Image: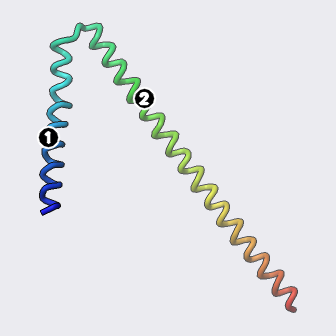
């Protein structure tokens, strides 16, 4: 029952948001002047550009974290191997 209510609410919300997202540009074209429409378009381009740059920054940081993690694991493996050989040499 819980899943059905949740699915129904999600469907209704997505329909409402989709309708608003589609109807908004049509209302803007009928109410705004051509200069204002150009400003809205440029604003959208700036927003998309900022979102794309943020995405690239997060991807780059993720790659850097993976590289650092791999280096840390490699250094740890090398240290363990070195300690083991030193212990074997000490025991011999």
For label 2, the residue is 49
Q: Is residue 69 above or below residue 20?
A: below
Residue 61 screen position, x and y as percent: 56, 46
Q: Which mark is residue 78?
A: none
Q: Disc 1 versus disc 2: distance between alpha carbons? A: 27 Å
Could you tell me which residue is drawn at 85 percent across and 90 percent down? 91
Residue 26 screen position, x and y as percent: 16, 21
User: Hey, which quadrant is residue 41 in on the image?
Assistant: top left
Depth check: 53 or 31 in front?
Answer: 31
Q: Secondary structure at mark 1?
A: helix
Could you tell me which residue is drawn at 15 percent across and 13 percent down? 30
How crowded pointer 1 is (Cα within 10 Å; few <14, some 14-19, many 20+) is rated as few
- Of the 4 image quadrants, the one containing the C terminus is bottom right
Q: Is residue 92 left or right of residue 29?
A: right
Q: Is residue 36 left or right of residue 88?
A: left
- Of the 4 image quadrants, the one containing the N terminus is bottom left
User: Hey, which quadrant is residue 60 in on the image?
Assistant: top right
Q: Secondary structure at mark 2?
A: helix
Q: Is residue 88 left or right of residue 58?
A: right
Q: Which mark is residue 15?
A: 1
Q: Is residue 88 left or right of residue 18?
A: right
Residue 16 screen position, x and y as percent: 15, 37
């Amino acid at each position: 029952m819980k899943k059905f209510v949740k699915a129904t609410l999600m469907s209704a919300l997505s329909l409402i948001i989709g309708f608003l997202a589609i109807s908004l540009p049509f209302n803007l074209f009928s109410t705004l002047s051509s200069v204002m429409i150009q400003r809205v378009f440029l604003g959208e381009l700036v927003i998309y550009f900022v979102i794309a740059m943020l995405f690239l920054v997060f991807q780059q940081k993720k790659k850097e974290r993976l590289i650092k993690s791999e280096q840390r694991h490699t250094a740890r493996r090398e240290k363990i191997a070195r300690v083991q050989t030193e212990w074997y040499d000490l025991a011999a």
